[in-house]
Amino acid sequence: MRLFSGFTCNEKLMTNACFIELLKESVLKGIENVDMQQREEMINKAYTALDTALPILKASEYMQFYYTGNRTDFQKPYYLRRSMLIDLILGELFDRKGCFIDKITDLTWLILEESTWVIPAHNRNGLPLLYERDEASYIDLFSAATASLLALVYIFIKESIDKKDKQICIRLEEEIEERILIPFEKYAKNWWYVGYIEGHKINNWNPWIHSNILFTAAIFVKNHNRLVRLCDDMLLYTDNWLDTYGSEGGCDEGPSYWAAAGASYFDFLDLLYMMSQGKIDKFKDKLVYNIGDYIRKMHIFDKYFVNFADSGPKPGNLDTHLIYRYGKMTGNKSLIDFACMFDMPVRISCYHPYRSLLNIISFKDCFSAYKYTAKNQEIMEDIQVFIFRNKMHYFAIKGGHNRESHNHNDVGHFILYEKDKPVIIDTGSDTYSKKTFSDERYTLWNMQSSYHNLPDIAGFAQLAGSMYKAKNVIFDTNNRTVSLELKEAYPKEAGIISFIRKIEVKDEIIIVQDDISLDKQGYIEGHLMLLLEPVIDKDVVYVNDTKIEIKNIQTIEYEKISILNVIGLNTGVPERGEMAKAWDADFLFRVKTGIRSDKVCMKYIISRRD
């Protein structure tokens, strides 16, 4: 679907000067209404940043990604500079004593002096370093976010900086022009995430980058005709992303990336709404509504969400204040109540500066009285995700294909929670390295179907590619069943005649049944990934208060898997990466069942432990 076909921003946008004035007035007025506790927290964070040494960016650490795959050592100080800067800006807005101006000036100057704002993992020139002597030729996620962050300096701190030397903000304008605005005008259609290059699947980069470039343009583009042209281009480009979505608004990248995808699209629409004083209003569109509602549907309990793809089980980037505003703008009462259910502090992000401003000034509204009750089932047929609750368990299963954004080979994979406790899990992603987004992605164990809740068949696991997919996906609302044909998720060499996985959800029991037929006898090895060490008694697996009875197997065992990481950390010493931190564990467990046959009906009967 395309939301802006034939649409133009002409005669709808405020001038640059009027928009800046409106934004400043709204933010400064909103800050006056922030309660004392929140105000003190913002000021304290600014003092912490004031006492923190200026981070150093090293060429040797930038080059590590090229030579070792490590992206962490450069990114830590790169991100720290930016998080310190936004904390100092907000601290100055609340404190208004001038204590933070010099440190803001220093950080701004350091960022302007950086050879590139593109992080090493996004460097496309094929060399260890990226240094573009004139205008940039590429804008990545964090160069766009950097520009948006510097826009806050320009709006709120420029007057104070100019008192000492006007050259800094003149330089700031020049860098924005050369690193962001001119490259975007000249080269954007050549960038994969814009959506015009055949064979490249666009993802969260599109709305995330465009939301930040739109904010940057709104602040720095003084020529009104140029601003309209830029905005019209962005309407086309974001429509390319929107056109990849089904009518139900499902995000195949998972909840962690919804914060960058669907939530960034909300930022984009919200900013257009403000720039046009409501003349550009797409919040009544059903698809926009559904994109927001996705995050509510994927919630399990407390901070846990369904974490298919690269998403983590407890996304640290979800923003309940944004979710609240999304619900309010789209008229989604359930989403508003869902957001209010979380007792979370306002989230400030240097990657989403405009969003952070709006979160602060809407903070007081967010924890009003609410009554939110999760539904017993949620269906997203566009991404083939099916969610159920019964008296004891939460269960989610996916179909789809193996070329989804941030894909794992996981067609037919499921997870199971015992109320608030993870039992059968999706391990999620780990600390990103050079391998993560390369031709070697599927050499990483956690990307493979063998380490999801799926069988190996005749020695074969699933393969990557859109042709490896679920077919004949049937959902029965009344009987609470799902059936998926998974034959085509595996290579032809596996010799699968038929592989149907059927789910049946009852009040106290969940049954997962795998009916597999092969063209000749082969070994079928089933897998269950567990957070906690199981107890196995014959063909029954016990975890917490959950009993998993496994029918029609010949062997059963489990293994302990270390999830301490060395890949991408460059320490040589195993330590907790993103996966181990997410699960607060050093080990996971994999149950392996086996049977040799040409035809099998393997059943997992999941119930309450006696």
Image (cartoon, rainbow, N blue to C red):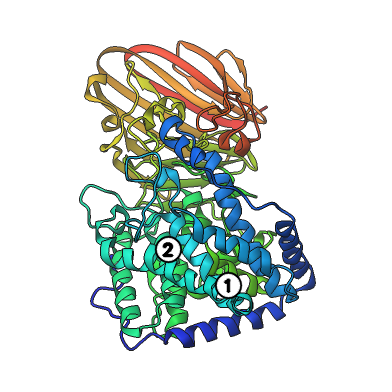
Q: Does the residue at mark 1 contact the one at mark 2 (Cβ under 8 Å)?
A: no
Q: Secondary structure at mark 1?
A: helix
**Residue in the image at 43% along x and 66% along y:** 175
Q: Which mark is residue 290?
A: 2
Q: Nearer the viewer, residue 502 or 362?
A: 362
Q: Nearer the viewer, residue 315 or 58?
A: 58
Residue 441 visible to an observer of this rendering: yes
Residue 351 visible to an observer of this rendering: no
- Residue 9 in the image, given as x and y percentages of width and height: 32, 81
Task: Say above or below: 162 vs 591.
Answer: below
Q: Which residue is mark 1?
A: 358
Q: Secondary structure at mark 2?
A: helix
Which quarter of the figure is the C terminus placed in? Answer: top right
**Residue in the image at 42% along x and 87% along y:** 14
Q: Please give the count of numbered marks on the rendered protein.
A: 2
Q: Quadrant of residue 45?
A: bottom right
- Residue 574 in the image, given as x and y percentages of width and height: 60, 24
Tell me which label, 1 or 2, sits earlier in the chain.
Answer: 2
Task: Say above or below: 379 vs 15.
Answer: above
Q: Is residue 566 left or right of residue 207?
A: right
User: For the residues marked 1 and 2, what is the alpha-carbon distance in whole angstroms?
Assistant: 22 Å
Q: Amino acid at mark 2?
A: Asn
**Residue in the image at 42% along x and 22% along y:** 602
Which quarter of the figure is the N terminus placed in? Answer: bottom left
